[in-house]
Image (cartoon, grey):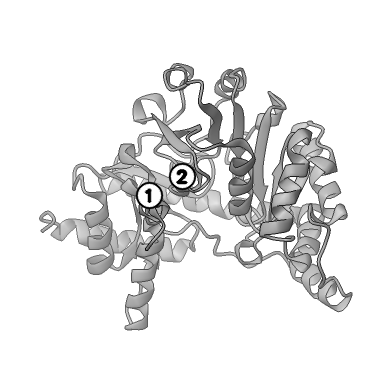
Amino acid sequence: MEARLLDQIKPFIVMEVLERANELQKQGVDVIHMEVGEPDFDVPECVKEACETGIRSGYTHYTHSLGDPELREAISRHYKKEYNVSVKPEQILVTSGTSPGILLALSVLLNAGDEVILSDPGYACYANFVTYAGGKPVTVPVDAANGFQYTPEGICEKLTDRTQAILINSPMNPTGNLLTPETMKAIAQYSPYIISDEIYHGLVYGEKAHSILEYTDKAFVLNGFSKLYAMTGLRLGYLIAPEKYMRHLQILQQNLFICANSVAQRAGIAALEKSGPDIERMRYTYDKRRRYLIKRLRELGFTIPVEPTGAFYIFVDAGHLSNDSYKLAFDMLEKAHIGVTPGIDFGLNGEGYLRFSYANSLENLEEGMNRLEGYLKSFKGLD
């Protein structure tokens, strides 16, 4: 008999789009990928060198369960430099990507039936993590009218005596927008803990991303190396947490994961300390793609309610084509051979939207837009 919990875990639709795209590619079809949020850049040279040096120098054994002390110290310095906040190395748990960090944070906060406030739309997996940890996801609708931003009033309406955390994500997946400092300050005043997913920090264009730690220390911060440093496959992230939870987090880490990859941790130190020029080059390129794709999508008749200033996503209103974003995305894949993510993946309030990722070359994005233009010219509705 299957565990009943499994029935409550929903598929991650973007991965199903990717898997179908990969099947088409095996059949010889050329697919332009704008569905997945994975940098197309190679890792910085300093990261490659650190991986090689780490292996040759014998950094191939277990590290401390909280993480390599040198890496935790480097992360502490990074938060002081970027946000002028003091984070003790003892408050940092290094994880195998940010996903384990989310699970660990929820595990120490939730008892069965406790609630976590999430935005709708929001990252598809958040609700599944909350459910798996025994909690109840409680969604706050955000939409184009409020810039896909939480409002203090919207959160207040959902607070109960079972609310244990409010989860924020800025820059946000799927919209690419940033929470304003004023909104973050307002959210920080609430009594539940804030879980702040800051994985897209550094990928910001014309604005500045703020850490929740600038406004409260009653927070769990998720961050890592996958997006900014193009290190997705190295699986390296970290969780910053209040000191009183660190021993519990450490015990869970020891039991569930032991420690993060030792060589990847050496690479993380190099990324934080030496990759500045590489980061600027990648950010400049992303911004160039962002501006191109915004312009081209609007030319093709799509509305972009909130112009993204972070991450590498554009969330477009495709309601004039269909309110079934799932069918629309797969129709585009099959007929135009472009992969995009249906808005329904991000919640009921994402229906009618499509997410385009510009984590692909400008040449491929141009080809993708040309294919999309051809698709739209022959579009007569979905079957």
User: Considering only order in the chain, which callout, 1 or 2, is on the residue closer to the N terminus?
Assistant: 1
- Indicate left or right for 322 with 295 as reference: left
Q: Nearer the viewer, residue 253 or 277?
A: 253
Q: Residues within 10 Å of mark 1 (few under 14, many from 20)?
A: few
- Please rate how many residues cluster around mark 2, counting C-alpha atoms within 10 Å: few if below 14, some from 14 to 19, many from 20: many
The image quadrant that residue 91 belongs to is top right
Instruction: Give the answer, above or below, for where 291 lies relative to 61.
Output: above
Q: Residue at x 87, y 53 (%)?
A: 69
Relative image position of residue 321 (x, y in whole percent): 18, 47
Instruction: Say if 130 sits above or below 180 in the image.
Output: below
Residue 92 image position (x, y, % from top left): 77, 44
Disc 1, SS: helix
Can you see residue 201?
Answer: no
Question: Tag 2: residue type?
Answer: Thr
Query: Foreground residue, 193 or 35?
Result: 193
Mark 1 is on which residue type?
Gln
Q: Quadrant of the C terminus?
A: bottom left
| Residue 67 appears in view | yes
Which mark, by number, is residue 315?
Answer: none
Which quadrant, please, contains the N terminus? Answer: bottom left
Marks 2/1: CA–CA distance: 7 Å
- What is the x, y in percent for residue 183? 55, 22
Nearest the camera: 91 or 114? 114
The foreground one among 109 and 204 is: 109
Q: Which mark is residue 131?
A: 2
Describe the element under mark 2 as helix, strand or loop.
helix
Query: Residue shown at 46%/21% (left/top)?
Result: 151
Residue 304, horizontal then vertical, whole percent: 35, 39
Residue 8 is tagged as 1
Q: Furthest-bottom residue in view?
A: 27
